[in-house]
Image (cartoon, grey):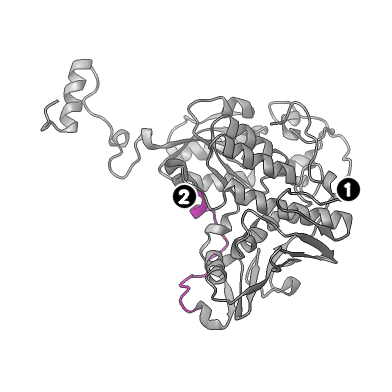
Amino acid sequence: MNRTTSRREFIKKTAVVFGMPAIIPGSALGLNGSVAPSNRISMAAIGIGPRGRLVLSHFLKAPDARFVTVCDVQKANRRTAKMMVDRAYGNEDCTVTPDLTEVLARKDIDAVMIATGDRWHGVASILAAKAGKDIYSEKPCAITMAESREIDEAVTLYGRVFQAGTQRRTVPNFRFAVELAREGKLGAIHTVHASINKLQETFDWTPADPEPAVDDVDWDRWLGPAPWRPYHQNLVRGGWRGHHDFDAGGRLLDWGCHTVDLCQWAVGMDGSSPVEFEPDGQTIRAKYANGVRLVMRLGGFNNEGDWLGLGTCPVRFEGSDGWVETGDHGKMAANPASLLENSGIPEAPGTDPDHHVREFLDCVKTRGTTSCNASNMRSTHVACHAAAIAVRLGRKLVFDPATESFPHDEQANRLRSRARRSPWHA
């Protein structure tokens, strides 16, 4: 081709020779602000209940991501999610399936968004890594301490990008508070506080309801790796939360995944965890090897639990020269107050995963490392699971972060993992 021939002229000439249409849509070339199909990340949504649809709605705003299929064991969820995708893209191309393995077998899918219930997060992530997919997983990402390690090892082995759905690492006010701690502006940090939910676990055996048609609710797939039990509609409608068979850490990880994660980041303990955990009533007191204390305590709504009422999921970092506390909605408090003079962070209703989704997509394209990568997820989840085990046993536990085990404590060590129901395992 002559060097002076423009791309558009070349396309026109090629069209004449091969009988192709002379007019190519600008979207196919990535013009007018669109993203060419060759530069889009082809994605699938796995688990699309209320939380899944919320996260999906943020992904759908990204011009460089394109959802080609949605997967859920409930027909109603599949229908609703397909409508969302088709409406966003102005077509009816999105396919639906109840079968996770069908999604992972597709060669045209680059990445998956996983927002199932807790029981499926880990297994789905490991299978996705093995299938060569990048992974955005809602939290809690692992239902046990052992599963946290398995996810990290699979993501590393298969060279995948992983983003845990602990989006507060990319929310401005939380990032600013962490920077104050990490940059020494609070002095030597001695105590960090993480808000948690009360450990609530039930082992109830729910009575059997008439089981729906498999196409409406595939009960066997819904249970997945969890122990078998008869169908009960309340479980499918969200009543599984707090039930030991389906829930990670008896609700403790619901907030702990976010707040303990921020505390670990603030004190430079990514990749590690505390060395002791001691339940004290409604509080869990932990300590790192360097002497810094981690206090996991209840509350965060208004002034509940002796917090300052700065929103849900509050954290507090205390040092020799001052402290900072922040929660959702962008609210912050500090002593001295001058610490916040240049924050420039506006208050906003709630938190959303926009920044988190953007970071994930950018890392998929650059093969970079996300802020909530599998290694950081692992250490935070291990710490939360260790805390939950201490509460279950009702006693102080000594922990070894290097081996992720409780030295000379067989009872505690048995609680680090669970059996998975065949064939639903990674």
Residue indicated by mark 2: 358
Q: State the image quarter where residue 80 is shown.
A: top right
Query: Considering depth in this image, is 369 or 307 the residue closer to the camera?
Result: 369
Give the total of numbered labels.
2
Residue 398 screen position, x and y as percent: 81, 58
- Look at the image and say whether residue 211 sits in the magenta stretch: no
What amino acid is found at the position of numbered circle 1 in the picture?
Gln
The boundaries of the magenta stretch are 341-359
Comparing labels 2 and 1, the label whose residue is closer to the camera:
1
Identify the residue shown where x is 74% and y is 49%: 404
Identify the residue shown where x is 53% and y is 25%: 106
Left or right of 276 on screen, residue 185? left
Examine the rendered structure and indicate whether residue 121 appears above or below residue 389.
above
Q: CA distance from mark 2 to mark 1?
A: 42 Å
Query: Considering depth in this image, is 404 or 219 the residue closer to the camera?
Result: 404
Query: In what quadrant of the picture does the C terminus appear?
Result: top right
Examine the rendered structure and indicate whether residue 297 appears above or below residue 221.
below
Q: Is residue 47 in view from this perspective? A: no
Residue 222 screen position, x and y as percent: 73, 34
Residue 424 screen position, x and y as percent: 73, 29
Give the structural element (helix, strand or loop) at label 1.
helix
What amino acid is found at the position of numbered circle 2 in the picture?
Arg
Residue indicated by mark 1: 411
Q: State the image quarter where residue 99 is shown.
A: top right
- Look at the image and say whether residue 356 sits in the magenta stretch: yes
Query: In what quadrant of the picture does the N terminus appear?
Result: top left
Left or right of 28 on screen, residue 253? right
